[in-house]
Amino acid sequence: MNRRPAGGGGRWLVVVGVTTTLLVVAGWALVGRRSQSTGPDAAVTPPPAGSVTRWAYQLQGYADGRLDALARGPWQLAVVDLARDGHTGYFTDTEIGAVRRSGKWVLAYFEIGSIEDFRPEYPVVRRDAPDLVANPWPDWPGEYFVRYWDGRWWDRVVRPRVDQALRAGFDGVYLDTPLAYEEISLDAAQGRDRTRLAAEMAALVVRISEYAKARRPGFLVVPQNSPELREQPGYPAAVDGIAMEELFYLATDEPCARDWCAENLAHTRALRDAGKFVLAVDYAVRPDHVRTACGRYRAERFAGTVTVRDLDRIPAPCG
C-alpha cells in the first residue's frame, strides 16, 4: 500500500525502523554496528535472525526535513524514501550515514510495480515510453500500474533507483507494489495471465537482488506485501525480509478477519520460518488495538509498529 502526503507536493516515503542490537552486559547496552564501516561503499552486515524487533515508519512530517528524530529513537531499522520530497531531493550519503552511525539499518523505499505522477521519472516515461504505463490505480489517484516485465522499465526506472540507493549508502531497498501482478488490468497485460504475471514480478525482485548484491555484498532486499511470491522459483533466496501491512488491523482499527488476512499471515510465517525477518505495520489508534497488535508481533516474532495511515508521525515503539 503506498501513500501520499496529507498536503503539499510529492510523497515523503517510508522511514522504516532502525536496527540496533540490545545485549545484556551488566544491564541493557545499546551496541549498534560496532566495527562495521558506514561508508556508502561498505558491505552490509545483515541483521542476525531475530535481532530486529522494533522499527519506525514515517512518510512525511520530518522535523525540518531531517532524519534526526529517527537517528535518536530506540528503533533498530528505518525505511526512508530515496527523496525527502518524493521527487528529486534525494537523501545524501551524509544524511543516511548519520542514521546508520546511530546503530540502525536504513532501507530506501521505492515502487517497482507502479508509478506516481509526481515522480521525476513519470514525465520522461510518458514522453519516451508511454506504453509502459498501464491502467490507473483507483485507490491512489495519480498512480498507475506499469508493464514491469518490460526491459525498458528496468533500464529507465528500477535500475537507476537501485543505483541511487547504493550511492546514498542505504543498507538495502524496501520494494513496494509487487502486488501489481494482481492489480494490473489483464487488458493491459499483453496476453499474460496472473500466473505469468506473478512469475515475472518475482523475476524482477530476483534481478534487483542480484544486481545490488553484486555491487554491495549483503545489501538487503525487502519487498512489501505479496508474501505468496515465496512460492516462485528463486524468490526466497533473493529476499532478506518481508514487510507486511495490515496483518491484524486494516486502516483504521478494523480487525483483519477476511480470508486473505489468514492467507497473508500463513505465508508470512513461512518466510519467517525460512529465516527472513518480518517488518509488520498495522493502522490503529485505539489503545486496546495497539496493545493487541503489539502482543501479536511478540507472539509471532515479528518486528512490528502500529501507526496511522498518513504515516506523518513516529509512534511509540511496542513494549
Image (tube, helix red, strand yellow):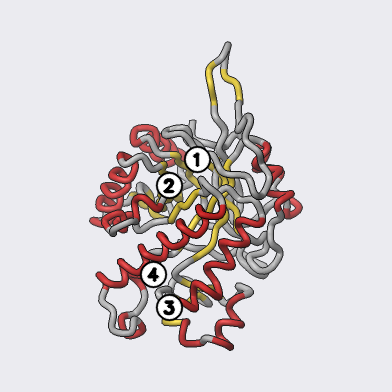
Comparing marks 4 and 1, which lies closer to the viewer?
Answer: 1
Which x, y percent locates residue 97? 69, 45
Q: Is residue 32 above or below residue 61?
A: above
Residue closer to the observer: 270 or 33: 33
Identity of the residue drawn at 57% across and 33% down: 20
The residue wearing badge 3 is 150
Residue 185, quarter of picture: bottom left
The label on residue 46 is: 1
Q: Residue at x 38, y 43 (%)?
A: 276
Q: CA distance from mark 1 to mark 2?
A: 8 Å
Q: Position of residue 36 (x, y in %)?
A: 62, 35
Q: CA distance from mark 4 to mark 2?
A: 21 Å
Label 2 vs 3, first from the N-terminus: 3
Which badge, 1 or 3, is on the more N-terminal residue? 1
Q: Which residue is mark 4?
A: 180
Badge 1: residue crowd in 10 Å (few <14, some 14–19, many ≥20): some
Mark 4 or 2, which is nearer the eye?
Answer: 2
**Mark 2 is on which residue type?**
Asp
SS of the residue at dot 3? loop
> Going by the image, does 63 lie left or right of 296?
right
Q: Which residue is mark 2?
A: 240
